[in-house]
């Protein structure tokens, strides 16, 4: 890991994080050499691109949209929409990336357009429709989850509105993308694979909490790693670990970690779809 440590220095000054770092080095691992997204040679460019895209994505969100715009909705209705999105993704075997893209699009639409309760089903289907076309190689056709031709027309209209709001900027530096980026840097040995699995599941839980969208996705990703390390009793000095690999420090993510734990407890009590999925995953790991 020495060559990674030489290339990555602490986040003491994030504005100059990767300045004067080596431009080339030999990759010692051979496990992921077939995957261009796992080539650490491009880690500097990936970091700057994610940071830039994260700022763009955050500019479209209004964390207070329930107070400012959505007088007919409440956070529980949003959580129910996320449950339905999860069902869609499970039914059509969509990627986890598609799930997180859909939730981001949902929050963008709710941040800008007031909707009524009668439109709830159409809006989350619209967001899934756009996300699946963008992320999936073979997206499920709309007729498989739209009830009739009238609903399809409404979805097409909402699609135009949402794409216009975003100016067709669909690239999303979500917390899922950031977590995969951090994991590539950390490159933890096989015995801690459960750490990644639990972190991903905590990211899925985190999206249910409306208060989390005000935080940068990079911090949410770090908070999921931090929280899952606690849950798995992984002995680690987080600040030292963050300094070594360029993650956010504990004081930056502690509040997010607490929100994730609160959301996890509420999701278990309310039997959210993601909790059912987590139980199935746990049973699969045990078997």
Image: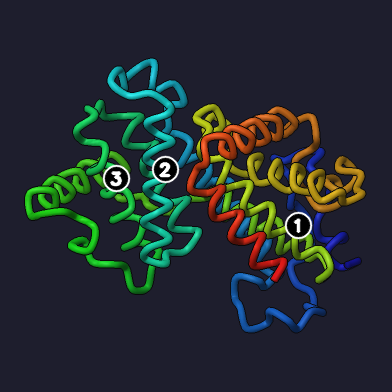
Above or below 287: residue 70:
above
- In this view, the residue in front, 195 or 63, is 195
Q: Residues within 10 Å of mark 2 (few under 14, many from 20)?
A: many
Q: Are marks 2 and 1 in contact (CB under 8 Å)?
A: no
Task: Choose mark 3 or mark 1, whichever is in front.
Answer: 1
**Residue 210, position in %: x, y?**
49, 30
Q: In this rendering, is residue 16 above or below 170?
A: above
Q: Label 1 belongs to which residue? A: 195
Question: Residue at 87% of width from left, 60% of height from top?
Answer: 5
Describe the element under mark 3 as helix, strand or loop: loop
Question: x, y (%) of residue 284?
Answer: 64, 67
Asked which secondary structure carries label 2, the reply is helix
Residue that appears at 76% across and 65% down: 193
Q: Earlier in the sequence, mark 3 or mark 1?
A: 3
Residue 231 is situated, as x and y percent measured from the top left of the image, at: 79, 45
Q: Residue at x 37, y 37 (%)?
A: 108
Are the residues tagged 3 and 2 within 8 Å (C-beta)?
A: no
Label at residue 82: 2
In this view, the residue farthest toward the left is 150
User: Image check: 136 left or right of 187?
Assistant: left
Direction from residue 240 to residue 283 in the image, left or right: left
Q: Which mark's residue is nearer the viewer, 3 or 2?
A: 2
Q: Residue 214 placed where, x, y %? A: 54, 29
Q: Which residue is mark 3?
A: 167
| The C terminus: image quadrant | bottom right
Residue 88 lies left or right of residue 37; in this view the side is left
């Amino acid at each position: 890991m020495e060559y990674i440590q030489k290339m990555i220095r602490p986040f003491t000054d994030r504005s100059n994080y990767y300045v004067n770092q080596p431009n080339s080095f030999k990759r010692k691992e051979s496990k992921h050499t077939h995957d261009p997204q796992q080539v650490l040679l491009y880690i500097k460019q990936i970091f700057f691109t994610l940071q830039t895209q994260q700022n763009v994505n955050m500019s479209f969100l209004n964390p207070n949209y329930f107070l400012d715009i959505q007088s007919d909705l409440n956070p529980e209705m949003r959580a129910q929409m996320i449950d339905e999105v999860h069902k869609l993704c499970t039914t059509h075997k969509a990627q986890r990336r598609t799930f997180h893209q859909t939730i981001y699009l949902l929050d963008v639409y709710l941040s800008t357009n007031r909707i009524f309760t009668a439109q709830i089903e159409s809006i989350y289907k619209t967001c899934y429709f756009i996300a699946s076309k963008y992320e999936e190689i073979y997206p499920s056709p709309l007729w498989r989850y739209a009830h009739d031709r009238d609903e399809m027309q409404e979805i097409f209209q909402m699609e135009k509105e949402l794409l216009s709001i975003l100016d067709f900027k669909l690239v999303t530096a979500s917390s899922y993308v950031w977590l995969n980026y951090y994991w590539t840097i950390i490159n933890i040995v096989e015995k801690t694979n459960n750490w990644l699995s639990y972190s991903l599941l905590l990211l899925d839980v985190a999206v249910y909490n409306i208060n989390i969208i005000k935080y940068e996705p990079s911090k949410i990703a770090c908070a999921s790693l931090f929280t899952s390390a606690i849950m798995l009793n992984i002995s680690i000095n987080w600040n030292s670990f963050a300094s070594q690999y360029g993650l956010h420090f504990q004081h930056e993510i502690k509040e997010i970690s607490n929100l994730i734990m609160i959301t996890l407890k509420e999701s278990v009590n309310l039997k959210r779809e993601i909790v059912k999925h987590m139980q199935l995953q746990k049973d699969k790991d045990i078997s």
